[in-house]
Image (cartoon, rainbow, N blue to C red):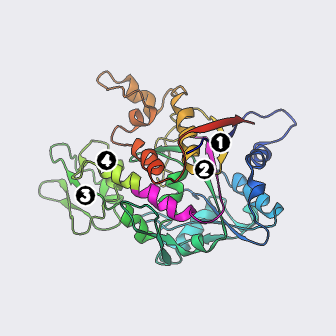
Amino acid sequence: MAKSKVYFTDFRTVAFGDGLTAKLQKLCKKAGIADLDMDGKFVAIKLHFGELGNISYLRPNYARAVADLVKEFGGKPFLTDCNTMYPGSRKNALEHLECAWQNGFTPLTVGCPILIGDGLKGTDDIEVPVEGGEFVKKAKIGRAVMDADVFISLTHFKGHEMTGFGGAIKNIGMGCGSRAGKTDQHSGGKPHIIAEECRGCKRCQRECANGGLVFDVGKKKMTVNKDNCVGCGRCLGACNFDAIAFDNENANEVLNCKMAEYTKAVVDGRPNFHISLVVDVSPNCDCHCENDAPILPNIGMFASFDPLALDQACVDACLAADPLPHSQLAEHLAAPDFHDHHDHFTNSSPESEWKSCLEHAEKIRLGSREYELIRS
């Protein structure tokens, strides 16, 4: 594939000049968003509204800037995300909308409607064929996402406890999957408990939505009910004592490949455009009900028609940055027995894996990892 163009601008502003939202709009225009035929079309803007208690998600101001651009070019924008498969404040449309409102996303603040893509209970989905799919033949995508004529992703680029980082591909592939689609993507492996490491704190159990974890009162240890477990990996990220491991050693790799294939299902055959902001780079997903200190400095805003090139550009920028002090990443690097992987994402979450996602995305021709970075 030929090199894709990725446009970049930093977060610097001039006193009494344009603010960051105006800068974002200028970046999108330079990247060619006006080339999308949006006149009279329904335009889905996919983003993460943030879990209640988490404050590292993208501010609603950025969503408003993108929605206003869509309206400027004649489109009919709506913000969207699909329901989660784990406990929290976004597991059905009513709670999801309430969470979005509490986090500042309302039709008044963002200038457009907000629709939960897979409906009230997360069951309103459509099966979409994946061209060239090796792990997924038909992706289960929220119906409202697929009903849109134009698709735009607006991503908070940050770390992730399983996939290394959460970028455009994760925002699209995992985020647009219905509850059944998310279960499908997470079904590559099941965890087991390393009894000698388990402290019986039950933190992992609070993250399980499916009755997959059972506490043995007599032994004061957690156990796995594999009939109920869907392999989502939330318990893995919740355990502070490395007491949980996956039976399938390549579970993360399979998850990454499925996310890439789900992303291809979402964007294939219709106009699409992608924006990522590398800001407040928390070590874990915005799905957490808390956020730790950023592991890397605020780097900038990126935009492209190619979600794979966009992720690669963001990764490269992050790997070239210096870790922030007093962060999870810095603490790991300072530990006397820590093995330095020379990779900020792996060093931050050693149990994570991210390279397979980009490799597989290129293999199935989602986009190109070769890109030309154009500074704005």
Q: In which image quadrant can residue 9 be found? A: top right
C-alpha gap between disc 4 and disc 3: 15 Å
| Callout 1 amino acid | Val
Percent x, y of residue 228: 26, 68
The answer to whether 252 appears left or right of 244 in the picture is right
Residue at disc 3, secondary structure? loop
Residue marked by disc 2: 306
Span shown in magenta: 258-280
Tell me which residue sits at (21%, 64%) in the image: 226
Q: Which residue is mark 4?
A: 239
If you read the primary sequence from the N terminus, does the residue marked by circle 3 or circle 2 appear first? 3
List the single residue furthest toward the left: 218
Residue 166 in the image, given as x and y percentages of width and height? 50, 48
Q: Is residue 47 left or right of residue 28?
A: left
Q: Earlier in the sequence, mark 1 or mark 4?
A: 1
Residue labelled with disc 1: 6
Report the residue marked by disc 3: 190
Give the x, y percent position of residue 230: 30, 64
- Mark 2 vs 1: CB contact within 8 A: yes
For numbered disc 4, what is the local secondary structure?
A: loop
* Foreground tag (1 vs 4): 1
First of labels 4, 3 by sequence position: 3
164 sits left or right of 112 in the view: left
